[in-house]
Image (cartoon, coloured by chain):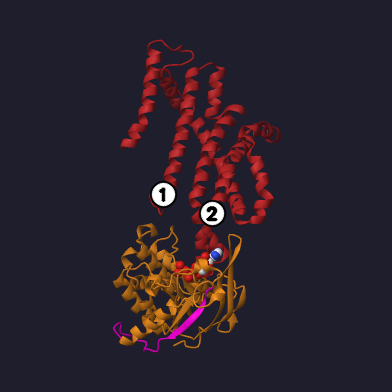
């Protein structure tokens, strides 16, 4: 493990030790803060017979479906805003206004339109992923190098060549930032959807269920899983970015 | 040899820019006829409109007045028949060196294999075969400029426009590339317009040397070199050409003519040696 990764592990380790200490000394009420052992036992139980992997898979699939939908809409929309001045004047202000609505403010509307089933959750996640992808794509496309566009003009690039050769790669760093943010947003929205549009399944559903049964070990386990999964998404996105942007000076 | 193509005719060419609300005449009436297969070099002080002239011939800028034509057809925009090597390398940072050269063939009617061959040949020409797979950020300034030269040459345009292409190169590489360029130009018969700050280079390469005067940019003199295509750097006649170009550059039109003195800010001290002006 690299030195940096080791340093990054210091804080979580300290927290774990403090948690362990608080449980052992009886400083914390075990009904409110279960011991690490209790959480580990809940994890073991969940993994072997309690359907924990299934819940995790459901959350991740839901997250990815919503993210894919949002990104698939956000990319072309961002390109349109970035490439066309007309689109910018027509759609830009509206988009900026809608963007001001906090993602969670959509929940009542979505619940009215789509209910609280799977469709509603995925639509909600898609909305959360859409904005950062669209915004950063538009920004990246707009800041395309005029110098390189002139080179393209000299070599008679077609519109498609301009997009493939100049706009797309030039905007890639920005697009990837948007995708990265979209991924994070989508995961937050997944948790939110599972908390607020409760229909049982998924890690978020597990947490809510644990709360209702006052099973703090399950709640704790769920929260830890949500955090770890988010962390993993983040790490995967960062690694993908690095690989796709090899041409950049590091 | 394709001696028929590549005539550039320019008459009454005026180009203005708006800078900070004020009108700036970058080119104030340029007339020039460039013969097919001619190697024309252009010298002039910084800011006298050399790049602007090339960009107009390339079709990247539109004239405010006057006419430009290529083989009789008015120049309305860029064409694959006219290649431009910009003053800066302008490489695509996300493409390797070889891919950057291949950009010059993006729309050439060649097979994949033919393109690869042409790219390899031109990388060898500029001495960068070993860097085919390098990223632009891994190159020095001179190397990047050589990639840009290869990209400009690879498509074999009828008219080749080069904007100070050898400015960032060391003396030896520069001398070698001057000879290579001259040889290519002889072989392909491409009409070449070559902008430079270096009077020696202008005299050594050019069939004619166009001396531009600044503010507004216009032709002060065209020096006919009248030397054979194969030249010797030590040829004493080259010294005579240099002398004439330097003299043309050194003339300051503002001084003897009071009518122009109103705008005194741009006058240079008469003591400044012409050679120094160029550096
Ligand atoms: N896009 C532009 N907008 C405004 N002014 C411009 C523009 N391009 C050129 N100019 C002006 O036109 C004049 C001529 O510029 P140009 O780049 O042609 O000079 P140059 O002879 O190539 O100089 P150098 O030797 O330094 O490259 C300059 O005064 C410059 O400020
Ligand atoms: Mg210039």
Describe residue B145's horizontal placement relative to residue B23 as left or right: left
Rendered view: A109 above or below B136 = above
Which segment is the magenta one? B216-235
Label 1 marks which chain's residue? A
Near-viewer residue (B250 or A2): B250
For ligand 1, tell me if the residue under mark 2 lies within 8 Å.
no
Asked if marks 2 and 1 fall on the same chain, the answer is yes
Q: Is residue B218 magenta?
A: yes
Q: What is the secondary structure assignment of the residue under circle 1?
A: helix
- Can you give x and y, in whole percent of width and height, for residue B249 in the image? 43, 77
Pointer 1 residue: A243
In the rendered structure, the colour chosen for chain B is orange
Q: Indicate the quadrant containing the C terminus of chain B: top left, top right, bottom left or bottom right.
A: bottom left
Residue A182, image quadrant: top right
Secondary structure mostly seen in the magenta stretch? loop
Pointer 2 residue: A143
Give the residue displayed 31% in from the left and 86% down from the top. Answer: B236
Measure how far apart labels 2 and 1 are at the Cα level. 22 Å
Label 2 marks which chain's residue? A
Chain letter for the part of the structure drawn in red: A
């Amino acid at each position: 493990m690299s030195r940096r990764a080791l340093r990054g592990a210091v804080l979580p380790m300290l927290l774990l030790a403090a948690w362990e200490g608080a449980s052992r000394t009886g400083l914390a009420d075990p009904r409110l803060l279960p011991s690490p052992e209790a959480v580990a036992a809940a994890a073991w139980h969940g993994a072997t017979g309690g359907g924990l992997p299934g819940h995790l898979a459901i959350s991740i699939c839901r997250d990815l479906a919503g993210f894919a939908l949002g990104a698939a809409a956000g990319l072309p929309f961002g390109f349109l805003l970035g490439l066309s001045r007309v689109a910018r004047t027509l759609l830009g202000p509206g988009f900026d206004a809608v963007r001001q609505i906090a993602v969670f403010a959509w929940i009542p509307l979505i619940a009215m339109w789509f209910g609280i089933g799977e469709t509603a959750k995925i639509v909600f996640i898609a909305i959360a992923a859409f904005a950062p992808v669209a915004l950063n794509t538009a920004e990246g496309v707009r800041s395309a190098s005029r110098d390189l566009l002139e080179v393209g003009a000299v070599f008679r690039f077609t519109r498609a060549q301009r997009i493939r050769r100049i706009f797309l790669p030039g905007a890639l760093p920005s697009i990837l930032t948007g995708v990265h943010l979209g991924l994070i947003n989508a995961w937050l929205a997944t948790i939110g959807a599972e908390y607020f549009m409760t229909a049982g399944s998924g890690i978020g559903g597990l947490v809510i269920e644990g709360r209702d049964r006052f099973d703090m070990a399950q709640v704790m386990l769920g929260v830890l899983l949500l955090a770890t999964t988010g962390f993993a998404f983040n790490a995967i996105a960062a690694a993908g970015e690095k690989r796709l942007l090899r041409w950049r000076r590091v | 040899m394709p001696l028929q193509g590549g005539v550039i005719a320019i008459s009454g060419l005026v180009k203005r820019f708006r800078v900070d609300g004020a009108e700036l005449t970058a080119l104030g009436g340029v007339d020039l006829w460039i013969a097919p297969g001619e190697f024309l070099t252009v010298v002039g002080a910084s800011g006298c409109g050399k790049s602007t002239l090339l960009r107009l011939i390339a079709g990247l800028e539109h004239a405010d007045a006057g006419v430009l034509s290529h083989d009789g057809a008015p120049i309305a925009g860029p064409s694959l028949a006219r290649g431009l090597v910009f003053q800066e390398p302008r490489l695509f940072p996300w493409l390797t060196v070889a891919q950057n050269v291949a950009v010059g063939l993006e729309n050439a009617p060649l097979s994949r294999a033919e393109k690869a061959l042409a790219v390899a040949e031109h990388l060898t020409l500029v001495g960068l075969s070993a860097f085919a797979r390098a990223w632009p950020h891994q190159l020095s300034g001179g190397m990047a400029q050589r990639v840009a030269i290869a990209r400009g040459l690879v498509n074999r345009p009828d008219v080749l426009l080069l904007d100070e292409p050898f400015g960032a190169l060391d003396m030896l590489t520069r001398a070698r590339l001057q000879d290579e360029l001259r040889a290519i130009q002889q072989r392909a018969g491409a009409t070449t317009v070559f902008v430079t700050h270096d009077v020696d280079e202008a005299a050594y390469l050019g069939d004619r040397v166009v001396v531009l005067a600044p503010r507004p940019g216009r032709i002060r003199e065209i020096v006919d070199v009248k030397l054979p295509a194969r030249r010797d750097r030590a040829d004493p006649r080259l010294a005579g050409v240099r002398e004439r170009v330097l003299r043309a550059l050194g003339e300051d039109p503002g001084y003897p003519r009071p009518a122009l003195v109103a705008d005194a800010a741009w006058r240079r001290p008469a003591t400044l040696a012409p050679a120094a002006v160029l550096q």
